Amino acid sequence: MSTMTKNYEARARELGLEIPDYGTGGYYGADTYGSMKPHHIVGNVLYLSGHTPDTTDGTVRYPGRLGDNLTVEEGYQAARLTALNCLGGIRFALGSLDRVKGIIRSLCFVTSTPDFTEVHKVSSGSTDLFVEVFGPEAGLGGRATIGVMSLAGGSSFENWVTVEIDD
């Protein structure tokens, strides 16, 4: 898809996505979770800090543990909300989703019990949304999912995303 024809901002609007605006309220992670910056850019690569399904005021959505008090569907929804927050982080860093050339990779963390083995189904909530917005070529990057015992604030999901920038 050439830079002249892509319009990811319009696609997000068409999908009715409510993407948080970190330009007005700031990135929730630094206020809630300590010393960090929301992103770092090296050349044409954007590295986002970790995003969770939290609201912009830091309220944790879908707290808990998969395999205990959360279902796969609830985890999927937490991952989808996290992807919305990642889109807000991308827009905050680049000014527009239209500057995305592609998702390079997503590293997903799922808070789960030791015997919960469907972490990949949870992470699809995030990567499915990226595909909806950016299409399969630009929106589907590499992905790894790790089950963890806990995440800050009791969150059930966190995502680190690396994005190729189209200048």
Image (cartoon, rainbow, N blue to C red):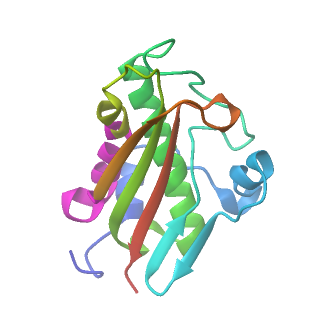
User: Taking the image as drawn, is residue 17 in sight?
Assistant: no
Residue at horizontal 36%, vertical 39%?
123
Residue at horizontal 56%, vertical 38%?
53
Give, as a single range, the part of the protein colored magenta.
124-141
Tell me where residue 26 sits by quadrant.
Answer: bottom right
SS assignment for the magenta stretch, majority: helix
User: Which of the image's four quarters has the N terminus?
Assistant: bottom left
The residue at the far front in this view is 114
Q: Is residue 39 above or below residue 122?
A: below
User: Taking the image as drawn, is residue 89 in sight?
Assistant: yes
Foreground residue, 122 or 139? 122
Residue 144 lies, in percent from the top left, at 34, 49
Foreground residue, 105 or 2? 105
Residue 42 lies, in percent from the top left, at 51, 83
Residue 159 lies, in percent from the top left, at 48, 48
Foreground residue, 123 or 137? 123
User: Which of the image's four quarters has the C terminus?
Assistant: bottom left
In the picture, measured across the screen, residue 121 lies left or right of residue 109, that is left
